[in-house]
Amino acid sequence: MHYDIHGLTSPDAPTILLSSGLGGSGGYWAPQIPALSERFRIITYDHRGCGKTGGTVPEDGGISTMADDVLEIVETLKLKSFHFMGHALGGLIGLDLALRRPELIESLVLINAWSKADPHSGRCFDVRIALLENAGVEAFVKAQPLFLYPAIYMAENPEKMAAEQTHALAHFQGRDNILRRIAALRAFDVDGRLGEIQAPTLVIATRDDLLVPYSRSLRLAEGLPNANLVLTVAGGHAVNVTYPQQFNRAVIDFLSTLEHT
């Protein structure tokens, strides 16, 4: 597993591990690194099948297998406990870890995540799979921002959209890896076990998320015993990218409250 360490370097420093969504790149968290660097040792990583980690996603793998990859990093760094922040798929990995290895998780930050996929998200996955299978990789990549960002953000950032498309094409994780990762998203279901997770949790959602209805985050906030909810009007699926200042403030405020409990 390829990982990078940012911010504080001491092994004794408070540590936060960041896990991205379907794209699987540790670079997704660039808007968060400066804001967290003064207080935390930050660990980002490329998911299996993605980026510098590369390789193949197991055919019968699921979210728990992806969580095992995180545990490999945890073992390598000899982490006794850490905060965990996950976006969408990354949030599901955090939920799995909190259920299987609760002693490791000091807190969770779950961004546009879910305990069980909504049928609407399934429709979006169907569209993306159809594009990949019938129109090819370029069409799949070109459509990707539609599921991540609000229209106005895409309209105001054409150079960024072009750069992201070029990068995504050059580093495409492969048809089989994408299909297996989407299958893991669809199969994940811990809805009946949310009450078992005791870790303090910040649930962040946006009302205009095209991919994941914010009702999924309301369910997380309702079902997790120690959850706080931040529900924003705008920002899209990738709210940590589109509104980084507001997002970072919410995360830092949440983590700061834990220092005094």
Image (spheres, rainbow, N blue to C red):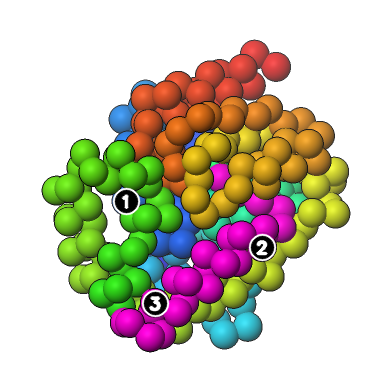
Q: Which residue is mark 2?
A: 119
Please tell me how many numbered marks the rendered image carries.
Answer: 3
Residue located at (38% from left, 79% from top): 132
**Which amino acid type is marked by label 1?**
Gly
Measuring from the top left, give residue 228's x and y in whole percent: 68, 27
Name which of mark 1 and mark 3 comes first in the sequence.
1
Vertical placement of residue 130 versus 157, above or below? below
**88 or 6: which is nearer to us?**
88
Q: Is residue 200 magenta?
A: no
Q: Earlier in the sequence, mark 3 or mark 2?
A: 2
Q: Are marks 1 and 2 in contact (CB under 8 Å)?
A: no
Q: Is residue 4 visible?
A: no
Q: Nearer the viewer, residue 9 or 223?
A: 223
**Most distant residue in the left direction:** 159
Few, some or many residues within 10 Å of mark 3 (<14, 14–19, 20+): some
Q: Which residue is mark 3?
A: 131
119 relative position to 36: left or right: right
Q: Secondary structure at mark 2?
A: helix
Q: Give the residue displayed 46% in from the left and 77% down from the top.
A: 129
The residue stretch that appears in magenta = 112-136
Secondary structure mostly seen in the magenta stretch: helix
> How many neighbours does mark 1 have within 10 angstroms: few (below 14), some (14-19), or many (20 or more)?
some
Select label 1 or label 2 by which is in front. 2
Name the amino acid type tagged 3.
Answer: Leu
- Secondary structure of the residue carrying tag 3 is helix
Q: Is residue 95 above or below residue 144?
A: above
Q: Identify the mark nearer the N-term, 1 or 2.
A: 1
Circle 1 residue? 27
Is 127 covered by the magenta stretch? yes
Q: Residue at x 52, y 54 (%)?
A: 211
What separation in Å lies between label 1 and label 2 (alpha carbons)? 29 Å
